[in-house]
Amino acid sequence: DGGITQSPKYLFRKEGQNVTLSCEQNLNHDAMYWYRQDPGQGLRLIYYSQIVNDFQKGDIAEGYSVSREKKESFPLTVTSAQKNPTAFYLCASSSTGANVLTFGAGSRLTVL
Amino acid sequence: AQSVSQHNHHVILSEAASLELGCNYSYGGTVNLFWYVQYPGQHLQLLLKYFSGDPLVKGIKGFEAEFIKSKFSFNLRKPSVQWSDTAEYFCAVGIGSGNTGKLIFGQGTTLQVKP
């Protein structure tokens, strides 16, 4: 089945540590996105990439980094500079010329 | 800055009741409009979308939404809810005519349907 796989599903991190969330898609979509979901705030865009080796900051990029070396993969690193990293992170993708998003199951990060 | 506002944060209904969830956005230009739903333990998935044409759009599971341009609104409706409609609902707006996939989401509405 085509879709988006995010891992890990749950992750615990100590303060001061970087952590990388994986996102892989087999939908042959060109564009990929990372959103952060917090209760009562909906989804906010962190980073997005419309093509391999290119990505742009979203609304809340500070403290995060991404790479897009392969079409299928768009990992997100939550750095120690992110002041409030505990959240639910959603990866999504879309095909060229369409802004209908397909979402992964999400990764829940808790900073201890 | 563009924003999307969902009027109700938490809605509780009995089965067979009618549902209307409000969504307003702040942008005067071309928009694409979406409702996404997140059922408990499942992925966020598309419920329905509006790009152009008939402002009344129908989605999955009997849901529909009406785009009223003059009111900057895209309210979601269902005539008779079921217990299985219990979920979190998100309104989202794509700004401009380009399809970048960058969506602005509302805060979400949690719907609880009592059997």
Image (cartoon, coloured by chain):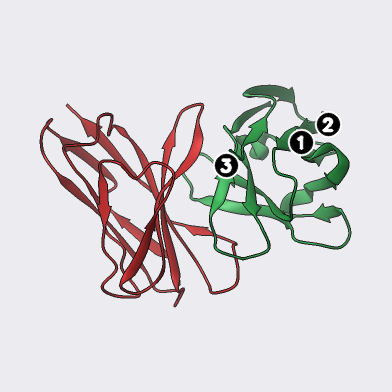
Chain colours: A red, B green
Residue bearing the label numbered 3? B105
Q: Are marks 3 and 2 in contact (CB under 8 Å)?
A: no
Mark sitting on residue B106: none
Q: Secondary structure at mark 3?
A: strand
Figure check: A13 above or below A107: above
Q: Earlier in the sequence, mark 1 or mark 2?
A: 2
Camera-nearest residue between B87 and B101: B101
Q: Nearer the viewer, mark 3 or mark 1?
A: 3
Which residue in the structure is indicated by mark 1?
Answer: B81
Residues marked 3 and 1 touching at CB (< 8 Å): no
Q: Residue at x 26, y 63 (%)?
A: A67
- Camera-nearest residue between B32 and A57: A57
Distance Cα–Cα, label 3 vs label 2: 24 Å
Q: Amino acid at mark 1?
A: Val
The residue under label 2 is B18
The amino acid beneath tag 2 is: Ser
- Residue A61 shows up from this direction: yes
Q: Residues within 10 Å of mark 2 (few under 14, many from 20)?
A: few
Q: What subunit carries mark 3?
A: B
Tell me how far mark 3 sits from mark 1, CA to CA: 23 Å
Which quadrant holds residue B68? top right
Circles 1 and 2 in contact, beta carbons < 8 Å: yes
Describe residue A15's horizontal placement relative to residue A78 as left or right: left
